[in-house]
Amino acid sequence: MTHTTGQAVDVSVAVGGAHQLIKIALEEGFTGIGVKQKGPIKKRFIHLDDLESIPGERARPTVWSY
C-alpha cells in the first residue's frame, strides 16, 4: 500500500550504484531502506520509504535486506 500512496519506491540499482544510493538515502533522512542485491542484476533494487514506527509496536529497522 505504501507504494501506491507515494510513501515508498523501489529503485532498480545494483553493485556500486546501490551503495551510493543507500548513502544518499541515509543522509536525506529516509526511515526505511530495503536492500535486494542478490540474484540477477535486473531483479536487484533498493526500497526507500519515509514511514515512522507505530508507537507501542516493535520498532522498524532503518536498513534491512531481502
Image (cartoon, rainbow, N blue to C red):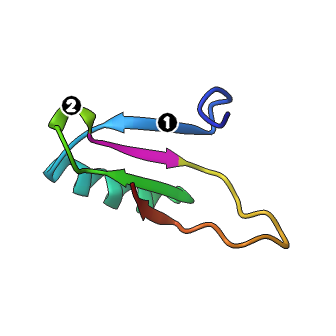
Q: Residue furthest top?
A: 4
Q: Residues within 10 Å of mark 2 (few under 14, many from 20)?
A: few
Q: Which of the two discs, 2 and 1, sits closer to the camera?
A: 2
Alpha carbon of mark 2 to alpha carbon of mark 1: how far?
16 Å
Front-lying residue, 50 or 1: 1
The question of residue 40 being in magenta is answered with: no
Image: magenta residue range: 44-48
In this picture, residue 17 sits left or right of residue 49? left
Residue at the (53%, 56%) spot, across then down: 32
Q: Main secondary structure of the magenta part?
A: strand
Q: Earlier in the sequence, mark 2 or mark 1?
A: 1
Instruction: Describe residue 56's horizontal placement relative to residue 3 as left or right.
Output: right
From what the image shows, is residue 60 above or below residue 45? below
Report the residue at 72% width, 64% height from top: 53
Instruction: Say which quarter of the image contains residue 66.
Output: bottom left
Q: Secondary structure at mark 1?
A: strand
Outermost residue to the front: 39
* Tag 2 near tag 1, CB within 8 Å: no
Residue 29, how many percent across, how many down? Answer: 53, 59
> How far from the left and from the top, in percent, is residue 12?
30, 34
Q: Amino acid at mark 2?
A: Lys
- Residue drawn at (66%, 52%), measured in percent from left and top? 51
* 33 sits to left or right of 50: left
Which is nearer the eye, 16 or 41? 41
Q: Given the image, on which type of amino acid does mark 1 rest?
A: Val
> What element does badge 2 sit on?
helix
Q: Tag on residue 9?
A: 1
Residue 52, percent from left and from top = 70, 59
Which residue has dot 2 on it? 42
Per the rendering, the mark at residue 27 is: none
Q: Which of the 4 quarters of the picture holds residue 23? A: bottom left
Where residue 65 sits: x, y (%)?
38, 60
